[in-house]
Image: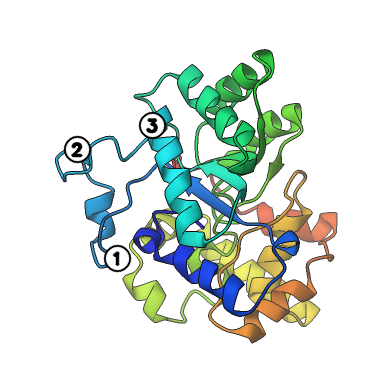
Amino acid sequence: MAQTYSNGLSEVILGKAIKQLQLPREEIVILTKVYFTVAREYETSMSTSRGDPDQNGYVNQHGLSRKHIFDSVKASLARLGVDYIDVLQCHRFDYKTPIDETMQALHDVVKAGYVRYLGMSSCHAYQFHQMQNYAITHNLTPFISMQNHHNLLYREEEREMFPTLKLFGVGAIPWSPLARGLLTRPKEEQTKRGATDWFNNRYLEALGTPEIIKRVEELANKKGLSMAQIAVMWSLSKEGVTAPIVGTTSMKNLEQLIDVANMKLNQEEMKYLEEAYVAQAVLGHL
């Protein structure tokens, strides 16, 4: 989750669910993010909140400055209706704010009791290394997780980021392990999401995509599982991956993915799925 999703409405919905269902707070791990702007109205287009914030009338309401980190965290707590956030993640790397300011502010929201742990998301390995090393050498709160873009159709994170995470003992919680649905169905099968999601075109442009999807389907049929289950099993079989972040539209789909949470593919199956991959440009970072 992120405070910018639906301009804060996602946090409001989660907060209401926790209260109405009387869910024990100690049994819930809440992760949200800070970086992007939250528009004043839910209906405002995401392109507006992610455009030039200053020109759109959102001065100081973006990035990883000390002011925005504190303001964003307090606003998230209010929307969620809770006393603390379990993991606060930096949604992107901020090129305009000094790292020392960002890491000190993140440490201070932890010391203030607003946040329990810190995480990073979607940045280059050298940026993560720089931020993490600053925190460690200055006795500040370090990152404990990296939410990065990683799936069978996009594996560039394995070149630099995964070795860096291993160096620091940080777990990966990949976003889009199902490649926005492309790994859940045969390539020829059309869905509304597939027809309207511009991001899918980036996957489809990669040379290895058709063959990889075909192999996921073949392995799923062989093992009597769904393609989504195979994609998640592959993700969980990668060293350092702790919790792939999936999105579903039904309880049945969610239950299917939970069923394979403790299952992994063997080396032969992993090789079969991976060998068709072709290197591509970085996708998902700023």
Q: Earlier in the sequence, mark 3 or mark 1?
A: 1
Looking at the rendered structure, the secondary structure element under dot 2 is: loop
Q: Find residue 166 and report its image quarter.
A: top right
Q: Secondary structure at mark 1?
A: loop
Q: Which residue is mark 1?
A: 42
**Of the pair 193 and 10, the residue shown nearer to us:** 10
**Residue count near mark 2 (Cα–Cα under 10 Å), binned few <14, some 14–19, many ≥20:** few
Q: Quadrant of the C terminus?
A: top left
* Disc nearest the viewer among 3 and 1: 3
Q: 78 above or below 141? A: below
The answer for how far apart the CA atoms under marks 3 and 1 are is 23 Å
- Report the residue marked by disc 3: 67
Identify the residue at horizontal 26%, vertical 51% (top origin). 49
Tags 1 and 2 in contact by the CB under 8 Å rule? no
Q: Label 3 crowding class (10 Å Cα cut-off): few <14, some 14-19, many 20+?
A: some
Q: Is residue 272 visible?
A: no
| Residue assigned mark 2 | 54
Q: Earlier in the sequence, mark 2 or mark 3?
A: 2
Q: Is residue 233 above or below residue 192?
A: above
Among numbered discs 1 and 2, the one appearing first in the sequence: 1
Q: In the image, which disc is placed on residue 169?
A: none
Circle nearer the viewer, 2 or 3: 3
* Whether residue 206 is situated above or below residue 73 in the rendered picture: below
- Residue type pointed to by label 1: Tyr
Q: Amino acid at mark 3?
A: Lys
Image spot of residue 81 (x, y percent): 52, 61
- Whole-percent x and y of residue 151? 60, 55
> How far apart are the two marked residues, 1 and 2, measured between alpha carbons?
19 Å
Name the amino acid, label 2. Asp
Tags 2 and 3 in contact by the CB under 8 Å rule? no
Question: How far is the residue under mark 2 from the one under mark 3?
Answer: 15 Å
| Residue 273 visible within the image | yes
